[in-house]
Image (cartoon, rainbow, N blue to C red):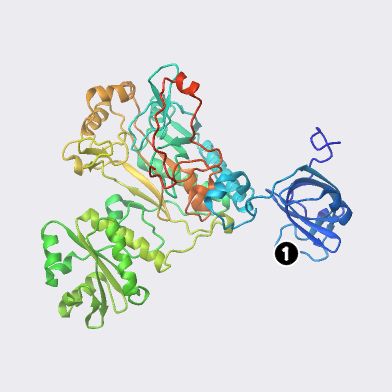
Amino acid sequence: MTATQVGASWRRTHNCGELREDHDGAQVTLNGWVQQRRNLGGIYFIDLRDRYGVTQIVLPEDLEAEVKLAREDCIAVTGVVAKREAPNDRMPTGQIELRAATVEKLSTSKTPPFEIEEKLDTAVELRLQYRYLDLRRPDMQRGLMHRSRFIGAMRNAFLKREFAEVETPILTKATPEGARDYLVPSRVHPGEFYALPQSPQIFKQLLMVAGMDRYFQVARCFRDEDLRADRQPEFTQLDMEMSFVEEEDIFAAWEGVLSETFRDSMGAEIPTPFPRLSWREAMERFGSDKPDMRYGMELIDAGPWVPHSGFGVFQSIVEGGGRVMGLCVKGGSEGISRGNIKKLEEVVKTYGAKGMAWWKPGLEGGAAGSIVKFCQGDSGAKLMEVMGAEEGDLCVFVADEEPVCWKALGALRTYVARTLEMIPSVDGADQGGSGPWNFLWVTDFPMFEWDAEPADGGKPRYVSQHHPFTAPDDWELAGDPAKMGSRAYDLVLNGWELGSGSIRIHRQDTQAKVFDLLGLGKEEIEMKFGFLLEALSYGPPPHGGFAIGLDRIVALTLGMESIRDVVAFPKTTAAADLMCHAPSTVDPHQMKDLFIQHADLPRPKEDGSKS
């Protein structure tokens, strides 16, 4: 009987993580991969692995000589379960072993290019090239299984709340949503293209017009943008939309869904309701619209000290409409050396600041620092009061336009917290799931921002802070666009943006005016959004929604900062698939069918640059 026959004796009765002491004496069959092979004086011990666990197999020498097993061979083993003479408490199956009577090779394996083990230390490129082997590693499989449980629990939570799961098109129309589209040429319509969706945004709004008042979808999305550790060109989000709602309804729905999902998928309890900050308060206090609330060290307005300082540089910046802001790093005088202060200066310059001032206060005022001569006597006492500083602290300052102060000091806050190990470690799903899980709603984002150098080379213009379908605070859009507020909101977890949402524009006149403020001409509006404006003329309900990045939240709940290890087949930072060798050239006949001519173009390097 061969291993490929239907109903053959090789089919497993149990998995490799299942057997325990109460199976002692049972005859079973296991299937799996040879993880290790050890010869102990005529008896061979095999660690047999599948995605459920590892079981020790005992083989007599004559049986091993007959089958000649190698690492990663796929085998079937039949035998009797027995208690181990020397149990291994580090393994769930460590109280037993399987004494093999028969072994059948289901397939053989070449020598793998790397060890199939946890905490693998090998090049990422090699792992991606042999991703199917990388995914055999137990930690990778646990990640994918956690992802499956998490998404399943979230889907169940929405279904319980009477949401309907509706699929929206993948082949759709190119619309401006902030990133480049992936385009698909049409064979039937020469010279015309579909676009892969950056999100289901417009379709889910049309579902609200259609009366599907509670929608959700596990949606695949595609964005042709520069990649980094937390981005992939294709990604998955849990997308939802509701009709006849305000912001509080969206927040309550998501808090309930996430609370239930964390409990059901990993046994974790998260407190609700989540705290909220307005966008301006988040920027003013933390220098970020996605602040990590697990530690303090908030930004401080040093403006009240400036008139007392005698420091002309700071005074002129404030008189010119700028600000002087800072951080007080408790114990930073010892924790951060002068050499490390140069690194802090590099951080703020990366975010647009011209430089950084610093001061280490002493008992009687200035002790050391680049501005120490302005921190003596009453001036030093005033600065200590403003900064909440004491001897042993480090105060750092940025003087510039308000947005530069925010961003530079926000980045510095994160850098210092990591350097001084102020950020609590996370117990993810593998460690019991206790977190900490610090959720935060950030609300009231600006409606528009000024783009002085558009990526498309066009004229400077206003662009949407979120997207052009976000409702404004004022439906009439009166006043200065730079000062208009929106009804947009983000959800943040431990300093990472999980997703964004908003109350949408359901009035045709308001939507048309937003397009106009964004510099879109009538013909362009009609070509790109005519169908949406038409739909908004047929009694659309007030509606809003939100979408959460599933790759990101799954990674965070495992204590990871990169989404790559929770995506089965990810791309590199050059958007390349090293296993399938995609993207690739195609057959000339396919190009001809699509009316496309090939041109020799520079190919991107791994870092995304052209060669």
Give the tally of numbered discs: 1
Q: Check disc 1 and report the residue beneath it.
A: 89
Spot occupied by residue 330 in the image (x, y as percentages of width and height): 34, 72
Spot occupied by residue 137 in the image (x, y as percentages of width and height): 63, 51
- 330 up-or-down from 285: above or below: below
Can residue 100 be seen by looking at this rendering?
no
- 513 up-or-down from 132: above or below: above
Q: Is residue 165 left or right of residue 189?
A: right
Q: Quadrant of the N terminus?
A: top right
Q: Residue furthest bottom?
A: 364
Q: Is residue 604 left or right of residue 396?
A: right
Spot occupied by residue 528 in the image (x, y as percentages of width and height): 31, 25
Can residue 44 be seen by looking at this rendering?
yes
Task: Tell me where residue 118 sits by quadrant.
Answer: bottom right
Q: Nearer the viewer, residue 271 or 233?
A: 233
Q: Residue at x 17, y 77 (%)?
A: 373
- 450 up-or-down from 311: above or below: above
Spot occupied by residue 565 in the image (x, y as percentages of width and height): 53, 49
Task: Tell me where residue 428 sits by quadrant.
Answer: bottom right
Q: Secondary structure at mark 1?
A: loop
Q: Residue at x 85, y 57 (%)?
A: 82
Q: Quadrant of the C terminus?
A: top left
Indicate the amino acid at tag 1.
Answer: Asp
Other residues around mark 1 within 10 Å, as few (<14) / some (14–19) / many (≥20):
few
Q: Residue furthest top?
A: 188
